[in-house]
Amino acid sequence: MSSSLSTPSSSSSLLDLPWEVIYVIFQYLNKEDIAYAFFGLNQCYRSAVKYFIGQELNLANVNDENTFGFCLSTLLPCIGFNLRYLSIGYPHALSKYIKYIQNYCPNLDILNIYCYSNIEDIRCYAAHLIHRQLISFTLVYNNKIVGEELSIRLTNKCENEKYRAVPSTSFLIFNLSSMNDLILLKRFSESSYLPDGLYMIECLSTGDWFTDGKDDLCAMSKKLHRDSIFSIKQIDSDRCSQEYELYNEGTQRRLTVLILYEDEGERWISSSILSTHRKESSRSCSRFTFERVANDNQFYIRPCYTNAKRLQVSGKRIIVSLCDNQNTLGHRFKLNHIS
């Protein structure tokens, strides 16, 4: 008698594993990787992934572009309504996140942002995300809370309400990349929005016009002429940095601050620091912010570079302020809007 033994072919599938094993696997993976690998398998796995992610998701430090794109375009629309905590940031900029957060994450309690991207200015985050309804706004640097008074000023500022994209967020955390971020946020909190247009800039201490002189910018007796009219135009289309460029309408020269670096051979006397005539160097700056002093168009004018000081009048010259007394009348200018 002969007999034949046959071994049936056996195959196993991930879909056949018990859910207990699946959840053990989930515990060893990042949530974004779980979503990318399992979310689209079938409806049961979709429900299991949503349950495992729960109300917290961390998308910071997601380096794989496919995984990141999947989380934004597919995952957030499905689970965003249930999220209460979301962490975003490096290596991706706010511009990649903002519309998805606005459209799909209306119930966030905590938005934790790692502001380490070199693509965007830290003030973009402030302009789009800070709102008056915040319970807490925290700035963190090297795992320590910094700039608590600045946080309060930024929360109270909120001039452009149309950019409050996530008003439902109760707790907002900015993890800063450097103390330069803090300087930029301080400048943003102090600066005021100005409509683009033509202005005559008046020195409050003397009543003279801020004008384009023969060698430097200076103050001269008040009279209406083309050399005293400046075009002020905001250079940021998103209106988040509140930085402006100034052009002289008569000469079409740009207002420029030359930054002093004596070790590199740029030795400019103080009366020549602010000039439309002198040759620009790699250390020049043509951007300014306007810090409102009162409600009658009184402003401090500050060049936009790290640690820049407000402008002041010294004799007939306009110079970069060398004085620490920020209440000196010589620092104040009045902007008379012509058109």
Image (tube, rainbow, N blue to C red):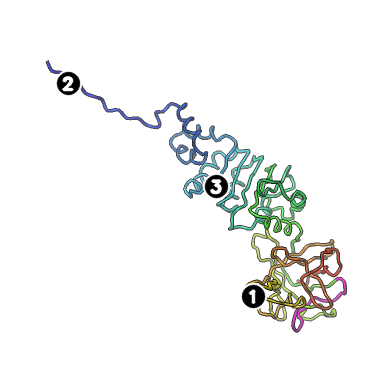
The answer to whether residue 92 is left or right of residue 257 is left
How crowded pointer 1 is (Cα within 10 Å; few <14, some 14-19, many 20+) is rated as few
Q: Amino acid at mark 3?
A: Asn
Residue under numbered circle 1: 281
Nearer-the-camera pick, 335 or 17: 17
Helix, strand or loop at mark 2 = loop
Marks 2 and 3, the one that precedes in the sequence:
2
Q: CA distance from mark 2 to mark 3?
A: 59 Å
Q: Considering the image in quadrants, where does the C terminus appear? A: bottom right
Per the rendering, the mark at residue 61 is: 3
Helix, strand or loop at mark 3 = loop
The answer to whether residue 65 is left or right of residue 99 is left
Q: Amino acid at mark 2?
A: Ser
Residue 315 lies in the magenta stretch: no
* Number of numbered discs visible in the structure rendering: 3
Q: Where does the magenta region start and end?
A: 204-216
Q: Position of residue 147 (x, y in %)?
A: 74, 51
Q: Amino acid at mark 1?
A: Ser
Q: Select label 2 or label 3 by which is in front.
A: 3
Q: Considering the image in quadrants, where does the N terminus appear? A: top left
Nearer-the-camera pick, 64 or 72: 64
Q: Position of residue 271 (x, y in %)?
A: 77, 77
The answer to which quarter of the image holds residue 279 is bottom right
Residue under numbered circle 2: 4
Q: State yes or no: discs 2 and 3 in contact (Cβ < 8 Å).
A: no
Q: Select label 1 or label 2 by which is in front.
A: 1
How crowded pointer 2 is (Cα within 10 Å; few <14, some 14-19, many 20+) is rated as few
Marks 1 and 2, the one that precedes in the sequence:
2
Helix, strand or loop at mark 1 = loop
Marks 3 and 1, the one that precedes in the sequence:
3
Nearer-the-camera pick, 40 or 3: 3
